[in-house]
Image (cartoon, helix red, strand yellow):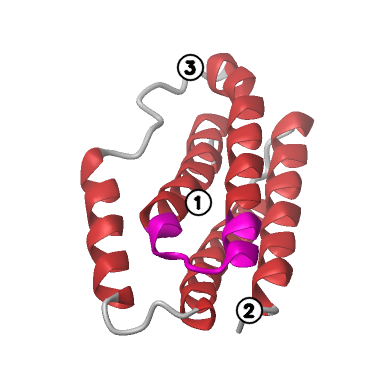
Amino acid sequence: MKEKDVVLKLYQNLDMGVIGIESIEDKIDSRDLSKTILNQKKEYDKLKSEMISLCKKYEVEDKELGIFVKMNSDIMSNMKTMMDSSDSHIAKMMIEGTNKGLVQLEELLNHYDGCDDKIKEMIQKILDREKENYEELKIYL
């Protein structure tokens, strides 16, 4: 897999995390869950900032996910929380999104055979963050 493709997927993985949180944050009643999820969003934003140098290095442009992805996320979140907006249901939704991110990151880690150590470090760093997110959320199930 080419470095440019890996960098784009990493950035978009983080962007999807932010989009997912933004689509659900106004539906959270619990102060504790809200704090947990907003802290996760801060971590995603911080990692996205770290990705900027790799995006520049590999000339990755148009890295943000489109408005359609954001609208779809909002619609799905609204539908899934219409009948149940409990902490456990929201945590389950967030864990499902986190699991998708973990699968994508594991695939990148397993298939990236390039030599850029910074890319490998970022894959691992984001993967570790996703695992932490999972652990933080599962207590709300």
Question: x and y percent of residue 21 in the render?
Answer: 47, 54
Q: Position of residue 9 (x, y in %)?
A: 49, 43
Residue marked by disc 3? 59
Give the position of the C terminus as an image quadrant. Answer: bottom right
Q: Residue at x 54, y 44 (%)?
A: 14
Residue 29 is marked as none
Crowd class of label 3 (few under 14; some 14 to 19; many from 20; radius 10 Å)? few
Q: Amino acid at mark 2?
A: Tyr
Q: Say above or below: 55 vs 132.
A: above
Tag on residue 140?
Answer: 2
**Closer to us: 14 or 108:** 14
Quadrant of residue 120 in the image? top right
Secondary element under disc 2, as helix, strand or loop, is loop
State the residue position of label 1: 17
Q: Earlier in the sequence, mark 1 or mark 2?
A: 1
x, y percent for residue 5: 48, 36
